[in-house]
Image (tube, helix red, strand yellow):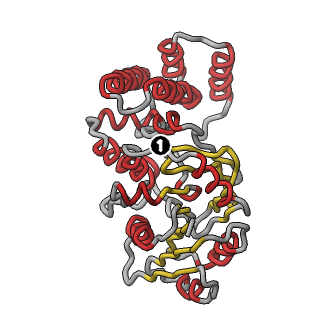
Amino acid sequence: MRVTVLIPVYNKAPFLKACLDSVLNGPFQDLEVVAVDDASTDGSLAVLRAISDPRLRVIALDRNLGPAGAANRGLDEARGEYIVRLDADDLIVPDRIVRQVAYMDAHPEVGASGSALTLFGATDVTWRFPLGNEEAQAQLLFGVPVSQGASILRRSVIEQHHLRYDTGWPRVGEDWLFWARMSRFTAFGNLPEVLTLYRRGEQNISHGRDKVKDHEVILRALFSDLDIPLTDERLELHLMALKLFRRPPTVERVKALRAWLDDLLAMNAARGLFPREAFARRVERAWSELFHYLPKYGVGAAFVHMRLSRSYPWDRVSYLVKVRLRALLTPRSS
């Protein structure tokens, strides 16, 4: 069997049939679908059991294990050469599996790959990911290199290196930590096309959560797994590099962030954790993208960012002036 489509399920009853139809009615037929119901309380299990397609195997957990535990059970049960991941409220485009299997067949060095995906529901945007391995590896300190729900994994790599999700990982961000662990053993890649439709709404596990606090937990686990020392100060600075702020960025915080990013570059030059040139580009991208978040906190932080960048491009100077004029002209509420 070529493909196992692994779908962890927790309280996604309204979306399950459409999700499964998008897989089972597609052109790729040499597959099984392993749906792991994580002790749902909304009738999801009944929806799954009502589907009579012989390619569907339903695993019902007797207690809720969370995303990591449910995914691990699915990995244990998978029989396909490749494992395609899909979230239970999402949809695949008809040729997703055909295109992903062809990509993996053509790139035997790649252990996991993905594609772009379009969000629908509460939001309508497209997320894109690094196409090549060096850029994907360089992404690891700044976000996921591959979208889990749009991914395909080479099962031989998973089994050879005994890769599983750690049940002690947080329930949000376990995919990021899994990719970091997998990165030690294999290459990544992504197709540029949109092959998955990601449903955004209140049913998402991350909906309504404190993004800063979630990232604090993820980053502590990530840096620990990569053996990169992370003090509370460095954690706050790295959050800032991700455009997540515990407190308003000041001139001194912007200076400290530049020093932290330089420390990361020096660390990588010494240890070779990530491809050197790609990592340098990714660090500078994080630094550059921060600029547009700074002017609303004051001229000083944005100006020192330009000074440390050794660049005063007219578009940024103009943007800074416009933001500050808007702030001065907007009446303050009493």
Q: Estimate the x, y position of residue 7 in percent, counting from the top left.
A: 53, 70
Numbered disc 1: secondary structure: strand
Q: Residue at x 40, y 53 (%)?
A: 178
- Point out the image quarter for the N terminus: bottom right
Which residue corresponds to mark 1?
A: 187
Q: Residue at x 47, y 70 (%)?
A: 78
Q: Residue at x 43, y 21 (%)?
A: 251
Mark 1 crowd level (few <14, some 14–19, many ≥20, 10 Å Cα): some
Q: Estimate the x, y position of residue 37 in percent, counting from the top left.
A: 48, 78
**Nearer to us in this view, 1 or 265:** 1
Above or below: residue 41 compared with residue 333: below
Q: Is residue 15 left or right of residue 186?
A: right
**Nearer to us in this view, 103 or 50:** 103
The tally of labels here is 1
Q: Which image quarter: residue 262?
A: top left
Q: Which image quarter: residue 247?
A: top left
Q: Estimate the x, y position of residue 105 in percent, counting from the top left.
A: 59, 52
Above or below: residue 305 compared with residue 126: above
Q: Estimate the x, y position of residue 69 in percent, counting from the top left.
A: 38, 69
Q: Residue at x 36, y 36 (%)?
A: 236
Residue 252 can be seen in this image: no
Residue 304 can be seen in this image: yes
Above or below: residue 284 compared with residue 13: above
Three-letter amino acid code at the position of disc 1: Ala
Q: Is residue 129 left or right of residue 176?
A: right
- Point out the image quarter for the C terminus: top right
